[in-house]
Image: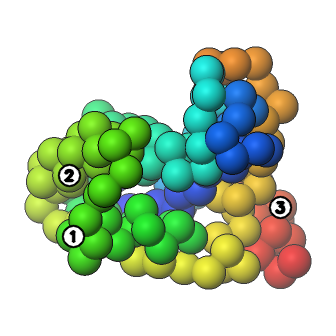
Amino acid sequence: MKHVTVYFDGACTFNPGDLWGWAFIVETPKKMIAAYGRGHGTGTNNVAEQLALWKALISLLASNVKHVRIYGDSNMIVSQANRKWKCKAPHLKKGHQAIRELAEQFTTISFEWKPREQNTIADYYSKKALTLKQGQQTSEVIDPLFAKKLLLN
């Protein structure tokens, strides 16, 4: 797996709140894999988005991926990852720095904003993460027909 596409998303029932989750989808020519989890402690939607991206980058590096296109529906997180916007929120600075350091380890990496309507699979799994126990995470291969159904809704 040398070149992949990733979609990420975060969800939070209250902003901030103690029920928040993250998800990322890895798409290769042969399959789609969802990884998702529920945060612990108090979090915000931006923390959930940031954690989803960070977890995706860690996973890709562990799989020796060198080239990646990343899509997310958080304009703020994507713009910060692209260095178009500064990260000003104190509670996000550490995560932002970690993402930048991980991103530098790829041969090629791009971050692009997509409207939520075009990020439906990651959105679905970030909300599914809210059903897990605090701190729990899991992954699964996505059935292609299910993915198509989510994209059409």
Q: Which residue is located at x 53 percent, y 52 percent?
A: 46
Point out residue 130 in the picture as x, y percentages from the top left corner: 78, 36
Q: Which residue is located at x 65 percent, y 58 percent?
A: 122
The alpha-carbon separation of the residues under discs 3 and 1 comes to 35 Å
- Marks 1 and 2: in contact by CB < 8 Å? yes
- Mark before the other along the chain sequence, 2 or 1: 1
Badge 3 is on which residue? 146
Answer above or below: position of 86 versus 33.
below
Answer above or below: position of 127 versus 139.
below
User: Would residue 76 be found to the left or right of residue 105 on screen?
Assistant: right
Badge 2 is on which residue? 100
The alpha-carbon separation of the residues under discs 2 and 1 comes to 9 Å
Q: Nearer the viewer, residue 59 or 1?
A: 59
Query: Mark 1 packing: few (<14 Cα in 10 Å), some, or many (20+)?
Result: few
Q: Nearer the viewer, residue 85 or 8?
A: 85
Residue type at the position of mark 2: Arg
- Mark before the other along the chain sequence, 3 or 2: 2
The nearer-to-camera label among 3 and 1 is 1
Point out residue 32 in the picture as x, y percentages from the top left corner: 59, 56
- Choose top left, top right, bottom left or bottom right for residue 115: bottom right
Q: Which residue is located at x 83 percent, y 61 percent?
A: 146
Point out residue 147 in the picture as x, y percentages from the top left corner: 76, 64
- Marks 1 and 3: in contact by CB < 8 Å? no
User: Would residue 69 be found to the left or right of residue 100 on screen?
Assistant: right
Answer above or below: position of 107 versus 52.
below
- Mark before the other along the chain sequence, 3 or 1: 1
Can residue 61 be seen here? The reply is: no
Answer above or below: position of 80 versus 99.
below
Residue type at the position of mark 1: Arg
The nearer-to-camera label among 3 and 2 is 2
Badge 1 is on which residue? 83
Instruction: Please give the label number shown on residue 117.
Output: none
